[in-house]
Amino acid sequence: MTINHHPPEDFLADFATGKLDEADHLAVAVHAERCASCRRFIGALEHLAGAALEDAAPMAMKAGAFEALMAEIDEAPHATPAAVAPSAPLPDDDLPEILRRCHFGKQRRVAPGVKLQPIILPGAGKSRAFLLWSAPGTRMLEHSHTGTELTCVLKGSFSHEGGRYGPGDFDFGDGEVDHQPIVGGEEPCLCLVAMTGDLRLNGWLGRLISPFVRL
């Protein structure tokens, strides 16, 4: 497998230091599972962070700090996850191990030849994660984003102005990116997507159907 597209370095740094939302963290983790160069980069950052902690001068805690922290934990409301009917992931016999451990919501059709299945995450971050299955040759509408879109290709391929994206490749989109992905004609394309905000569809057709499209 040849991987040509990777997450931005600031995302890899935030992944290594635990700063990413849960959905974004999942997308980077799935890419890094297949990408040796990104694993090495993340490992180097984690090593540097560990060395910095070892070299840091210890600081004395205030009197009663531990007791106060435990009291806050005891008093914090405990969220009860909503019951979710079990659902099998979109058809695929080779999902990465990290995704096989996830819980999935109900599949739904979002456009001709395109199906979406949400991933149920316990956290309450700003981003959401889902699997996106597209039939061979599917041409998406040209769009931008009101937030960010992190896409990790699991199977198949798609292309747009930024190049061709195959298994293991990582695509980053935000409000400064306009693109029109076209799925390769050889097989369906299955992607893991982490998204904040919504799609901003371009053109008269995009503006017409935009209120009905929700990923």
Image: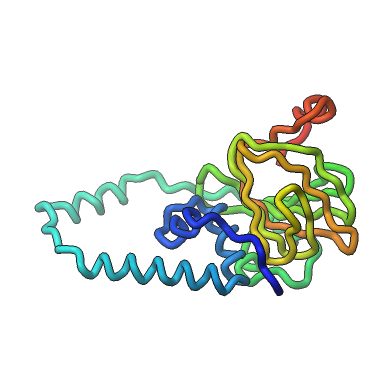
**Residue lying at 39% horizontally and 44% vertically, measured from the top left:** 77
**Residue lying at 77% horizontally and 38% vertically, measured from the top left:** 142
Q: Quadrant of the N terminus?
A: bottom right
Residue 27 in the image, given as x and y percentages of width and height: 59, 58
**Residue lying at 52% horizontally and 71% vertically, measured from the top left:** 39
Residue 60 in the image, given as x and y percentages of width and height: 11, 58
Asked whether the viewer can see residue 60, the reply is yes
Specify the quadrant of the image occupied by residue 50: bottom left
Q: How many marks?
A: 0
Q: Tell me: 60 left or right of 139.
A: left
> Looking at the image, is 141 positioned above or below residue 151?
above
Residue situated in front as seen by the camera: 73 or 94: 94
Q: Tell me: 163 left or right of 59.
A: right
**Residue lying at 68% horizontally and 57% vertically, measured from the top left:** 192
Specify the quadrant of the image occupied by residue 204: top right
> Looking at the image, is 71 positioned above or below residue 4?
above
Residue 107 in the image, given as x and y percentages of width and height: 77, 51
Q: Tell me: 91 left or right of 149.
A: right
> Looking at the image, is 187 positioned above or below residue 134?
below
Asked whether the viewer can see residue 84, the reply is no
Q: What's the coloring here? A: rainbow
Q: Quadrant of the C terminus?
A: top right
Residue 96 in the image, given as x and y percentages of width and height: 66, 70
